[in-house]
Image (spheres, rainbow, N blue to C red):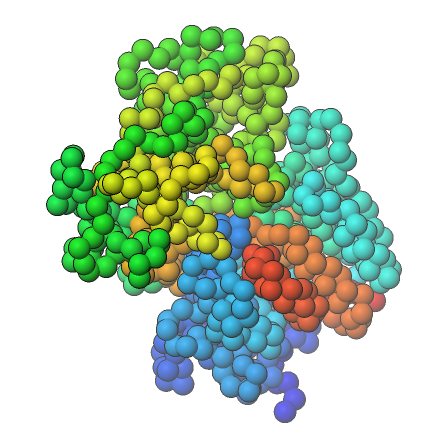
Amino acid sequence: MGSIYDLLILYPSEFQAALQPLINHKNAVGTRTLSIGLEQIYSHPAYASGRDVQEKIKLAIASAHRSFGIKYVMLVGDVDRFPVRYIRAWDANIWGHSFAPSDLYYADLYDETGSFSTWDRDNNGFFGEMNAREGWTTRWSELNHDQLELRPDVAVGRIPVSTVNELATAVTKIIAYETAGGPSWKRRLMLVTGDFENPRPDAEDIGQKFRQRGFEVVKHYYEDQAGWNDPAKLGQRAALLNTQINSGFGFVIYLGHGAEDAWANWFRRSDVAGLNNATKLPIVLAAACGTAAFTFLERTDGTPYYTCKTGGDYGCKCEDDALFQKDATFQAFDGSSASGFKLRSCNYPDRSVQRCDNSADLCIAQGTGLRFKTMPPQAGSLLLKFWLSLRSYNYPDRYLRHQQFNGELTPVTSALDQKDATFRIVPGLADSMFQNTFQFVSFESWNYPGWYLRDENGRLVLRRRPTGDHAFDCCATFKEVPGLTDGSASSFELYCRPGNFIRHRNYHLYVESGADELFKKDATFQKFRPQHDPTPDYVSLLQPDSNLYLLYSRVGTDLIAALKSLATDEDRVAASFRKLPGLASPNDQSFLSLEALVPQRALGIWRILSYGGFYLRHQGFRLKVHERRPIHLVDRPEPAAVQPDRFGFDGLGEEFLVKRPAGAIAYIGSYTGVQRHSYNMVRRFAEELSSCSNQARLGDLWNGALKRFKNIDFRDIDGRLKEGDWMGSAIFGHVHKMMLFGDPSLQLPIA
């Protein structure tokens, strides 16, 4: 059957009038267009079998594809207007599971048999499930749990607008772009690179493929030289890009570090206001972290950040780790200081800690239970190396501390001062999964476990670490470098804003840049013994009348609890636990929780740097040490398909596309962190462009890139899975992460 319509536009009813000029234009230029309101879909009996609004929409797209030969689908609306399908993804940047948006769901209509694909093969209510229930996987059957084909049957693009005015801006841009025809500026490519994973060879390869289609290529590459992190130089580079883009480019490609609001050290969301290229709009591709964020970011002030699918607001208060709290809470019973005591599970009170099948490993089970005696921490003086205080270089009587949750520099005189000035130095939250970033660190408060020092608009503050918020982790991660004034001391450079350091000014703490001698002194600190002695809060658990201690040992990726004698410093650290009130019952003194020290291992080296938030817990009745970070838990609530306005987030991509007449005609980027495989996504786009017909449309190139990525780059996954490498999961996830904002039927002048 031939195509009756080319383009399907789906929209909420409030946008109908604003879309009519675009529909008229599309039909006038030969793009036969069908438009359907979401309300019509929801009430149509043909789609009543859809389990939720996303599935009803997908059923309508599949029906239009079969009946009318639809090739392109435009979704009109941001997260607060048009439903988003959230897959249960696994992401190396947040190091665990989360719910992530995937517009590929609306494009991949059929499974390998040609039947409608629900993306929920096991019908458990989770869509596009990736990886094992916890951690990454070594098997394809778990990596692609729902057996998705991941081959788009239609080309889908989202116009991420929240208001009629934003839609009018986007419509005007599309009409003007297609009416302008093929002026010479559309056949120019700008390549911009940053300092992530040396993208220059990738950029050269991509540029060559554009040259094969007759494009002029202009390059602005990262130079490894002094001043790269200078804020003044950033302003100069942003001004350069604005001047260049204003001159007219058909494509702008950025490869490098990114954030939700910036191409790192090149261009920020606020810089888009400097563009006046409304008649020369490029297609932008950004192989960088987060620049196409459009759904929501997790907040740090305790307020809700999205609405749950099941109803009600879900905030950053970690309600979803109630199970973990119970699993990590134990009751001491049947004992005395002389005879020792037993440990009973909080949520299985008929079970206590004992050996698993007469082995050294420990479980919770019914039975008599093991008896333990509390001993001083066997880590001894090593404990003092995991906790520290930072003393000012030029005011040696003052220490870095938090006070009313703000960073301050004060003398330490009281017990509260001592606690406020004591921190655990942990592997950098933003980069801790990589094995060679020895210099990146974060600072966890002693008296507020799970709270970290972070940059907040230039001020150093103490905030609770929310669930899986990569932006928070970046703002709480610092590169430890030799002191700017004294190389034997230390200075701490912000991970996400290189060139900015923790410094004091008027005894308040900031994260700023500077170059004069006073700044260098203010930004230099001496690592000093912890002002609060942590030793009395730590214990080791000894089995009476033996030399066997409760400790954890690494078994694969797990930290399994067992009874063993202590032979090394690692053993002594693994047998030392911080005794805390029971997580699930903090006001009952008979309950306790035990936080472990878990030193970082990097390149085979055991480091005196401990990860935070690891507790002794039982899981499947087996006793282990496990991270209390809700991102690892499988029962986290799924976001609702449409979010309230207050939970929406506008990233750099939306600023380019719908916020102003200037900027871009389309934006392809990632809603979350990426690995260097995002460069390959852009490479596949360039390959598709170099071989496509002269009448190509944007959606054709994007779909071709997705198919090429699957056919070529997925081959690398097999080897990664065999090696137990998380990168296999990262490669797989990129087809979801990278999204097209714009009109997929946009006609491109390729000839």
Residue 717 percent across, percent down from the top left: 63, 65
Whether residue 34 is situated above or below residue 248 in the rendered picture: below
Whether residue 507 is situated above or below residue 339 in the rendered picture: above
- The residue lying toward the viewer, choosing from 516 and 697, is 516
Whether residue 703 is situated above or below residue 347 in the rendered picture: below
Residue 299 percent across, percent down from the top left: 39, 43
Tell me the quarter of the image containing the N terminus: bottom right
Whether residue 2 is situated above or below residue 77 in the rendered picture: below
Q: Residue at x 50, y 40 (%)?
A: 600
- The residue lying toward the viewer, choosing from 593 and 434, is 593
Q: Quarter of the image holding residue 264? A: top right
Tell me the quarter of the image containing the C terminus: bottom right
Q: From where the camera sits, is residue 15 visible?
A: no
Q: Residue furthest front?
A: 545
Q: Residue furthest bottom?
A: 1
Q: Residue at x 24, y 35 (%)?
A: 374
- The residue lying toward the viewer, choosing from 560 and 434, is 560
Residue 330 percent across, percent down from the top left: 22, 47
Q: From where the camera sits, is residue 681 visible?
A: yes
Q: Residue at x 34, y 26 (%)?
A: 534
- The residue lying toward the viewer, choosing from 451 and 7, is 451
Total tally of numbered discs in the picture: 0
Residue 624 percent across, percent down from the top left: 36, 51
Position of residue 731 in the picture relative to residue 391 (left or right): right
